[in-house]
Image: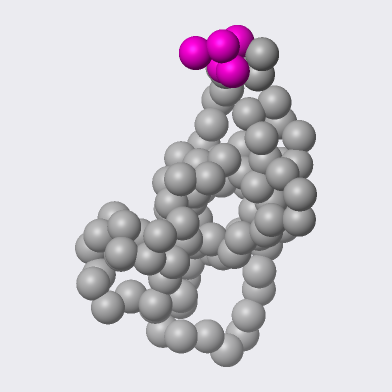
């Protein structure tokens, strides 16, 4: 799973029938402190009603995504599966001590 921030939407008039009526969002990967994690961007199908600027949890593995939506033949890899209210992580220095 990937922690990310929604930075935009994808609009397409011609698409695979699976995507009809589904919102696709552009998500930038972030670190637990909220800073962007390099140039990692993902286009993910929104399953929870996320909006621009929100922190989200992404399932980025095709088989798991297909199991979540219940369609073993769906052409999907990434799903937004949660809106994150907060992240509580130990400081990096204490993580290195263990």
Q: Is residue 76 visible?
A: yes
Q: Main secondary structure of the magenta part?
A: helix
Q: Residue 67 at what x, y percent from top left?
A: 25, 60
Q: Residue at x 33, y 75 (%)?
A: 74
The correct choice, above or below, for 88 with respect to 58 in the image is above
| 68 magenta-colored | no
Q: Residue at x 43, y 51 (%)?
A: 59
Residues 29 and 56: in front is 29
Q: Hey, which residue is sitting farthest bottom in the picture?
A: 14
Q: Hey, which residue is sitting farthest front in the picture?
A: 97
Q: Quadrant of residue 85?
A: top right
| 95 magenta-colored | yes
Q: Residue 12 at what x, y percent from top left?
A: 63, 80
Q: Residue at x 41, y 84 (%)?
A: 17
Q: How is the image coloured?
A: one colour
Q: Is residue 45 left or right of residue 36?
A: left
Q: Which span of residues is magenta-colored?
A: 94-98
Q: Residue at x 63, y 29 (%)?
A: 32
The correct choice, above or below, for 80 with respect to 88 in the image is below
Q: Is residue 5 visible?
A: no
Q: Residue 55 at what x, y percent from top left?
A: 62, 37
> Number of callouts in the render?
0
The correct choice, above or below, for 43 with respect to 28 in the image is below
The correct choice, above or below, for 42 with respect to 17 in the image is above
Q: Residue 43 at what x, y percent from top left?
A: 59, 64
């Amino acid at each position: 799973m990937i922690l990310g921030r929604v930075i935009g939407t994808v609009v397409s008039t011609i698409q695979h029938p699976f995507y009809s009526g589904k919102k696709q969002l552009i998500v930038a990967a972030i670190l637990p402190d909220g800073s962007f994690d390099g140039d990692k961007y993902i286009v993910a199908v929104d399953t929870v009603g996320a909006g621009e600027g929100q922190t989200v949890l992404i399932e980025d593995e095709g088989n798991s995504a297909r199991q979540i939506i219940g369609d073993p033949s769906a052409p999907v890899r990434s799903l937004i599966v949660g809106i994150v209210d907060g992240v509580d992580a130990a400081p990096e220095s204490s993580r290195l001590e263990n």
